Amino acid sequence: MSSFKVRTHSFGFIVLLILALSPSGLWSQTSQIAPEPRRYWFGKCPESTYMGIEVQVHGRMIHRSSFPICPVDARSTEKEDRPKIVAFFMKGGNVFQGKYRTTPTQTIEGNIWQAGADPGAITFGLSFSAKGQVLLNTVHVAEVNRESESEIDSGITVRTFPIRHEKSK
């Protein structure tokens, strides 16, 4: 009788060992939780979620705008293929990155575009240029559901914040 117990125990151990070492693909489990959609600032969406963005230089507002942010599934074709770029202009007289001096008579072009998207955040690219020279090229990470602020260069601040609009009736 004791030899039967040993064989049964050994057989059970072998089965467990095979199951433990088998590829996980044999035990396919599909997740019932859908991944959180990424948000994009272009495209058409019926939602009423907007984001505001402000750019200040030494406390002076140089750009302010708002735009809808649309939840888009990573596999979706709803988002546009070409990036949207918002341009704005300001007077010079600043030093960028501690080395690029501009004169007060120069016109500085600023650009904002979406550089990336993660669930819960949008990464915006920002650049400043004058006379064909890039003075600053950086990013700001905007959290979708709360205010985000970053000093992207000495004296230059970017602030993003959610705006909730009531749906039109």
Image (cartoon, helix red, strand yellow):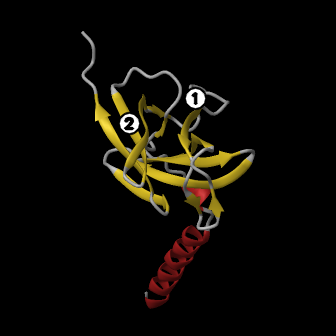
From the top left corner, tell me how far across and down residue 127 is, in percent: 61, 48
From the top left corner, tell me how far across and down residue 103 is, in percent: 61, 52
Q: Is residue 66 left or right of residue 106?
A: left
Number of numbered discs on residues: 2
In this rendered view, identify the residue nearer to me: 115 or 118. 115
Up-down relation of residue 74 to residue 5 (above or below): above
* Kind of residue indicated by mark 2: Met
Q: CA distance from mark 2 to mark 1?
A: 17 Å
Splitting the image into 4 quarters, where does residue 33 fall?
Answer: top left
Splitting the image into 4 quarters, where does residue 165 fall?
Answer: top left
- For the C terminus, give its image quadrant: top left
Q: What residue is at 60 percent from the left and 31 percent from the top?
A: 84
Up-down relation of residue 123 to residue 166 (above or below): below
Residue at the spot of label 1: 79
Splitting the image into 4 quarters, where does residue 91 fall?
Answer: top right
Q: Please identify the residue farthest to the right as the structure is shown.
A: 132
Disc 1 element: loop
In this rendered view, identify the residue nearer to me: 143 or 29. 143
Question: Is the residue marked by circle 2 packed among few (<14), some (14-19), or many (20+) residues within 10 Å?
Answer: many
From the top left corner, tell me how far across and down residue 41 is, in percent: 49, 33
* Kind of residue indicated by mark 1: Lys
Up-down relation of residue 100 to residue 90 (above or below): below
Question: Is the residue marked by circle 1 packed among few (<14), some (14-19), or many (20+) residues within 10 Å?
Answer: many
Tell me if residue 151 can be seen.
yes
User: Which mark lies nearer to you, 2 or 1?
Assistant: 2
Up-down relation of residue 114 to residue 66 (above or below): below
From the top left corner, tell me how far across and down residue 82 is, in percent: 67, 30
Q: What residue is at 39 percent from the left and 20 percent from the top?
A: 46
Q: Is residue 71 left or right of residue 92?
A: left
Q: What residue is at 61 percent from the left and 48 percent from the top?
A: 128
Residue at the spot of label 2: 51
Q: Please identify the residue farthest to the top as the structure is shown.
A: 169
